[in-house]
Image (spheres, rainbow, N blue to C red):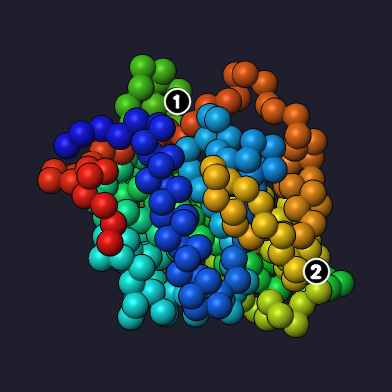
């Protein structure tokens, strides 16, 4: 297998995004650039230079429709949409759209949870207004998301005895967690309020839950933003979205924090960029 370096990894991910966007246009599905990808489009007109992934979000009705459509009408034979619902080795309560020509390794995941090059597709759900249970639900969701992280970690030995003990404890305490049950509970809580009848919406199935919650009106009339020479839909009030997520988002972080994810990826034997997607 040949290793894929950062510049080539970004091109594979960009191709996935382009193909996903074309598919959504054909089927009338709503989606938006999200998180670091939205930030990259606004600040850099493309990838954040040290970033190595792509995130989009979809209103829950469009997300569920896409998930069902793509099973019957795949984007490409070498592109697969997976979640925990039907792939036992997927630990995510959101879609990973992956390029099956590749194989990847994330350092903070056990071997059985490894995957291919992917882009993340997050569902957006409704958020109840003035509901006294909201804070409790967000706390529960944050704990469940954390549990997925703890339950999927490998046990990695190290020289520091205190860190070794902590790692061993986490592995023994959480290593046998029923991650499917955790993901199912995350989805059950997230989907309680319909997207289209809610004034507030958010990505409730992953990190920074409180910071993702905002006005549905931010998304109702999308704008097109440039990303690596292509144009994709983004929230009309992307400034409000990014400020909510990152604060002063136009100021890059310190040099020491400009690092990619701990992820390595290779072309599978017999594949490479010359074997184009259909």
Residue at which label 2 appears: 217
Position of residue 159 measured from the top left corner of the image (x, y, whole percent):
36, 17
Residue occupying image coordinates x 38% and y 74%: 70
**Vertically, is 15 above or below 88?**
above
Query: Disc 1 to disc 2, how far (Cα)?
Result: 46 Å
Numbered-mark total? 2
Q: Secondary structure at mark 1?
A: helix
Position of residue 11 measured from the top left corner of the image (x, y, whole percent):
41, 42
Of residues 107 and 222, the one drawn nearer to the viewer in this rendering: 222
**Vertically, is 276 above or below 71?**
above
Residue occupying image coordinates x 59% and y 66%: 31
- Which residue lies most toward the left here? 270
Q: Is residue 217 left or right of residue 271?
A: right
Residue at which label 1 appears: 163
Q: Is residue 3 left or right of residue 141?
A: left
Q: Residue 259: in sight, yes or no?
A: yes
């Amino acid at each position: 297998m040949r290793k894929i370096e950062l510049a080539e990894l970004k091109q594979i991910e960009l191709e996935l995004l382009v193909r996903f966007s074309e598919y959504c246009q054909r089927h009338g599905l709503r989606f938006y650039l999200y998180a670091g990808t939205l930030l990259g489009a606004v600040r850099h007109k493309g990838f954040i230079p040290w970033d190595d992934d792509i995130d989009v979000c979809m209103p829950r009705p469009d997300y569920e429709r896409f998930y069902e459509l793509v099973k019957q009408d795949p984007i490409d034979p070498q592109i697969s949409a997976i979640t925990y619902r039907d792939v036992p080795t997927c630990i995510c309560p959101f879609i990973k759209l992956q390029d099956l020509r590749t194989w990847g390794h994330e350092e903070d995941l056990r071997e059985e949870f490894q995957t291919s090059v992917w882009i993340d597709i997050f569902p957006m759900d409704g958020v109840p207004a003035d509901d006294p249970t909201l804070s409790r639900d967000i706390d529960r969701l944050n704990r469940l998301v954390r549990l997925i992280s703890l339950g999927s970690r490998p046990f990695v030995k190290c020289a520091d005895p205190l860190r070794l003990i902590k790692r061993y404890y986490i592995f023994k305490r959480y290593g046998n967690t029923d991650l499917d049950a955790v993901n199912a509970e995350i989805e059950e809580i997230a989907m309680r309020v319909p997207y289209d009848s809610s004034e507030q919406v958010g990505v409730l199935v992953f990190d920074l839950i409180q910071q993702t919650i905002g006005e549905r009106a931010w998304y109702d009339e999308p704008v097109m933003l440039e990303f690596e020479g292509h144009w994709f839909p983004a929230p009309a009030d992307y400034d409000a979205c990014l400020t909510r997520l990152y604060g002063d988002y136009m100021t890059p972080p310190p040099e020491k924090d400009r690092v990619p994810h701990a992820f390595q990826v290779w072309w599978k034997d017999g594949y490479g960029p010359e074997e184009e997607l259909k």
